[in-house]
Each structure stands twice: as C-alpha cells, then as structure tokens.
Amino acid sequence: MKANTIVLAFAAALTIANTNAQADSSREAMKTKAASIPDKVQTVAGELTFFDGVPTGKTNDLVYDYLDRSRAIGVYLDNVGAVSIYSVLLGMAQQGADAPNKIAIWEQLMDSRTPVITSNTSTMYAYAPTDLANDGPTVIEIPPGMLGFLDDAWQRFVGNMGVTGPDKGKGGKYLVLPPGYQGKVPEGYFLLKPSTNKNFLFLRGSIKDGLKVAVDNFKSGLRIYPLKDAANPAPTQFVNMSGRSFSTIFPSTLEYFEILNTIVQEEPIDAVGPEVRGSMSAIGIVKGKPFNPDDRMKKLLAEAATLGNAAGRAITYDPRIGGVYIYPDTKSNWVTAYANKDTSFEADGTMNLDARVLFYYNAGGVTPAMATTHVGEGSDYALAFLDGDDKPFDGSKAYKLHLPPKVPVNNFWAVTLYDTQTRTQLQTSQLFPTVGSQTKGMKQNADGSYDVFFAPEAPQGKEGNWLATLPGKSWFAILRMYGPLEPWINKTWRPGEVEPIR
C-alpha cells in the first residue's frame, strides 16, 4: 500500500513538472513570437515586408522615411519657442531695429496691422535683442514703472525687470552676462545670466497717465549699451513700429528648420541638452556643420512642418493634459495658456511637452509673473477658442459674452479678437479689435453686468460693446483682467461662455 502511494505521488509530481515545463515553454514561445515580426505587416509607414525578420523590398526606405519625418516633427514641437522669438527679432531687424541699442517701440500702441502673436492693444510695448557674442556684457538701464523680463534664444525665462524684478519698479541698471563669462563683474548692477547670446528683452509701460507720458518715460530712461562702452555709449535709438505691417510669425515650411539651424549655429553648443541636440542632429542640424538636406529630406521636413503645425492646433483646440481648463468642474471652454500656471512647463523633473507647445504656439514671452496672480496687481488672461457648444467660432454668425455684475478688477478688463490662422489680432474694420471697460461707448446693463457682442455687423445701440468678425473666417478671444481681485482668483466670479445668439 505504501509503495503504491509513493508511485502515485511520483506520477503526480511528474505530471505537475511536465505541466509547468509546458507552461514555461508556452510562455517562452509567446515571448519569442512577441519579439518577432510577420513577413508582411501593414503600418502607418506603409506595407513592410520581411524574410524571417530581415527587411526586404522597400521596407528599409519606408522605415527610414517614417523615422526621419517623426523625428523632425519632434524637433519642430520641441523648438517652437526658439523659432518663434527669432522670427519676432528678425521682423524687428527688417524694420530697422537691428541692434540692441535700436529699440522697437509702439508709440501709438500695437494695432492689428502688426502681426505679433496674441499681442494686446492696451499697453505700450518695447522689444530689443542682445548680441552678447559681439558686445560682451551688456547694460540695460530701465526707467521707473516698467514691467518686463529677459528670455533667452529658446524663449526660456532668464529674469524679471521693473515692477516684478529686483528694482521693484523704481528703475535701475541690469547687466546681462554672456554664457560662461569669467571676467570681472562690477558692482551696482542687477545681474542676468542667460545661456544664449541672442536674447529677447520685453518691456511694457502703463498708459494710465496717458500715452505720451508712457512714451516719454521710455525715451528718457531706457538705454542699452555694451559695458565696455559705459563711459561713452552710442545713443539709444527708438524705432516706432506703430502702424507698420511686417511679419513676425514663424513659418511651418522647410524654412522653419532653416531658421532653427541658424539659431543653433549662433548659440553655444550647450544652450540645449544632448537629447535635444541628438534629435536635431538626426535630421541634419549640427552646430559647426552646414545644413544641406537632399530632396528626399526636404520633402520629409516640409511634411513634418505641416504636421507640427497641425499638432500645435490640435493641442490648442483639444488639449488632453491637465491644468488647461480654468473651470474644470463645469462645462466651460475658458482656458489658460499656462497649464497648471507653470511657466517652466516642468514639474517633478518632467517636461510637459504639450503644455510647452500650447504656450509657444499661441503666445510669446515667458515670465513667472504672467502666471502668478496677486490681488489687485498685474494681469490674468482667459482664452476662448470654442463657443459654448464646443464649436469653432464662425465669423458669419453672431455671439454674445456675458460678464456678470461687479467685474472683479482693480484697473480694467478688455476682450480682444484674434485670427485663428496667425494667432495675431483679427484684421477687420476695427484697427484695434478690443472692447472693454475703458472703451468709449461701452454700455453697462442695469444690474451692473456687461454684454460683449461678436458679429459682422453691430447690434443696434450696442456699437460700443461690439467686436467685428468676418464671414468666411474663424476667430478666438482673450479676456484680460488687469489688477484681478479675489473673486476672479478664487473663481467665485466667472465670465459666461461665448454663446451663439440664436
């Protein structure tokens, strides 16, 4: 009896062992199959063919085309900030503001004739570049009352100036040091240390005391010159850009990559990291080497630029990341350009790729001050890309935005319309496509609320509350709150949706 039990136990153990071995063999077979590829497979790259895993026919060409195109799309999206700000500085240079001491200024404000991405009509702008490779350490003297910052060539934040900077709005001298500068640094300056030579100075002046006062303040106190010339600097010149029509919008063609190559050649090799340099190198952009794509690569780069452009628009109109919708608890299409109020687009050591594209595709100039709201100070923005029915705005139709009573601003509010193709001010019969609490003729409702109308023709008696649209064109709107108060910040007051008038 005992012998039979032993035999049965051994047989059972052998059966279990065989079963386990078969299971292990099956798992290994599945792993092998998962690592393999069929002899013919349909993919987005086309039909790929293999002989027992070895590419045959046109497979290698199809795969490399796909790789080069996809890598180029990544390069496009990763470098929108750089190409966009270069395009702005190039547009300025072509109008005569072609050196750091030749400052572009909009003395009569920025109207729809000047295509600058999501510019506004309510404050006075001044732009200037730096050229640290040529000039060395550069001094920027700013007058009191400024609001501004310096971004590097990739449109990354370097430092604030003016009200939000170390001079606290009193004015002062800033010294911009070249990358890797090891020389003597004199005292008496606020220091800025960008990682690039070409940088972007952005300044805004308040017009609350009148436009002439703001212009005079700029011209009397804004100076830019090399430190080496401090004893006898060349005069600072101001180039009035108001009323001029010139391009500052980055292209979505092969030229996009040509511009990026120019930036790479002009800046230190370590202005961007090895991973970004590797992506650019994979499509032929290498510092110190010519960028000469052949016909095949030109075609793929052009396709990548088109797809990158499309990706920017998809991310804008259908964001699939958190922190974009201002009122996520309810059905609302009001969004912010800075996802999660993060101006570095980076959290916990991880770059939010779509958040970076969302901002750089639709705006220009990065500073934490734009996303840090203080009660009664600065400004905050809300963007409406779709109507209350989740549809694009149609320039042939009429819409209304209702702002409830007691709009919570310390200064003023304004609504501006933009062109969906260029993301610049919509060009209509209205040179300044903006209405707001400072608009002459703006009518308030009996309960203290406001209605803003968007249509090809003004509603009778509401001309001061109306923004013109164009049949055949779409548009989007930005609501700017200057000096936002607590009800805006804590969301106890909120604007209505931009609704079709039925």
Image: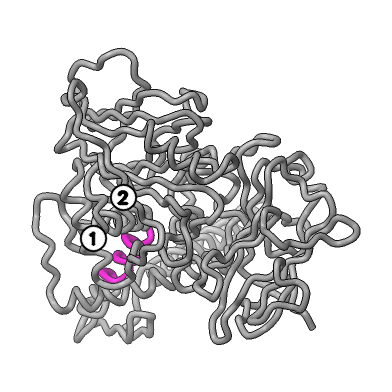
The spot of residue 274 in percent (x, y) is 26, 45
Check the image and tell me how it is coloured.
Answer: one colour
Identify the amino acid type marked 1: Ile
The spot of residue 307 in percent (x, y) is 38, 73
Occupied quadrant, residue 477: bottom right
The spot of residue 193 in percent (x, y) is 31, 29
Residue mark closest to the camera, 1 vs 2: 2
- Residue 4 shows in the view: no
SS for dot 1: helix
| Residue sitting at x 24%, y 68% | 255
The residue pinned by badge 1 equals: 259
| Residue sitting at x 35%, y 57% | 84
The spot of residue 183 in percent (x, y) is 18, 19
The residue pinned by badge 2 equals: 239
Residue farthest toward the top in the current orientation of the protein: 187
Q: In this view, does 170 lie above or below 72?
A: above
Identify the amino acid type marked 2: Val
Residue farthest toward the front in the current orientation of the protein: 212
Q: Is residue 488 left or right of residue 45?
A: right
State the residue in front, 122 or 179: 122
Our reading of the magenta stretch's main secondary structure is helix
State the residue in front, 17 or 441: 441
Residue farthest toward the right in the current orientation of the protein: 447
- The magenta segment is 67-77
Residue farthest toward the left in the current orientation of the protein: 289
Q: In this view, does 454 lie above or below 319?
A: below
Image quarter in which the C terminus is found = bottom right
Is-magenta flag for residue 202?
no
Q: Residue 185, labelled with which disc? A: none
State the residue in front, 462 or 368: 462
Q: How far apart are marks 1 and 2 (CA)?
A: 24 Å
